Amino acid sequence: MITALWEQLNQDYLSDTQPTHRLADGNTNHRTLSELPLVKVRDRYEWGTLQYLICASASDTLFSQITATFAHHNMNIVDARVHSIQSGLALYLIMVLPTSGDELSTAFLNLQVKNIRRQLLEHKREAQPRFVTLPRTIKQFPIEPLVTFTTTPTDSNTIMELTAQDHPGLLHQIAEVLLENKILLTAAKVSTVGERAEDVFYLTDGDGLAINDPSVKKKIADKIAVNLSPM
């Protein structure tokens, strides 16, 4: 199952199209389900990144748990893809920049995988600082957060697009805002261009429907703007 997931998700990663909301899961079996959450890592030396694959039971807190775990380990997510599959599972393909050569050793990577899996099993969501302190060089050219929403008449999802100053823990801050407002994540495409985060999130309300209430959208956008505003 894992090999098939790597290949299927990597094909989507290399594509500029929107993420697939539902992936085939014909290889999912009872043994695999008993091992959840699955956490695997690859050294993608050709991209200069570490690539993590996480497969877990979908829940309204999973996005926050995963992003909290990476933030806790000071791992900056520079690219990510989030998918849902038909058996009620969620798949996360996460790209992280290693900060030192030690992070590429097999022993270190195995330890990180164990730590991430343990924290997901414990359902930890470490609190992150509300405000972001940026290096002086970045402060000279700040990128103010911008949030926009789009919903097509035939789509059951609301698309939230975010542009902001990239920093460790950014995705966890977004995840917490969505959780506070009882908004569910069905898919996402996260990317970083230099110091600029350009992220797309596919969202629904608690009933699995598009977010049609303008006041809810405004509340989400305002909270994200406050939390991500550079200091």
Image: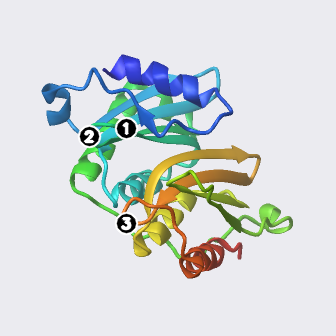
Mark 1 Cα shell of 10 Å, populated few (<14), some (14-19), many (≥20): many
Identify the element where label 3 is drawn: loop
Comparing 176 with 231, the one in front is: 176
Q: Marks 1 and 2: CB-CB under 8 Å?
A: yes
Mark sitting earlier along the chain (3/1)? 1
Q: Which residue is mark 3?
A: 206
- For badge 1, the amino acid type reads Ile
Residue 180 vertical placement versus 49 (above, below): below
- For badge 2, the amino acid type reads Pro
Mark sitting earlier along the chain (1/2)? 2
Mark sitting earlier along the chain (2/3)? 2
Q: Marks 3 and 1: CB-CB under 8 Å?
A: no
Task: Identify the residue at image location x=14%, y=35%.
Answer: 34
Residue 164 vertical placement versus 106 (above, below): below
**Which numbered disc covers residue 37?**
2
Q: Marks 2 and 3: CB-CB under 8 Å?
A: no
Residue 26 vertical placement versus 206 (above, below): above
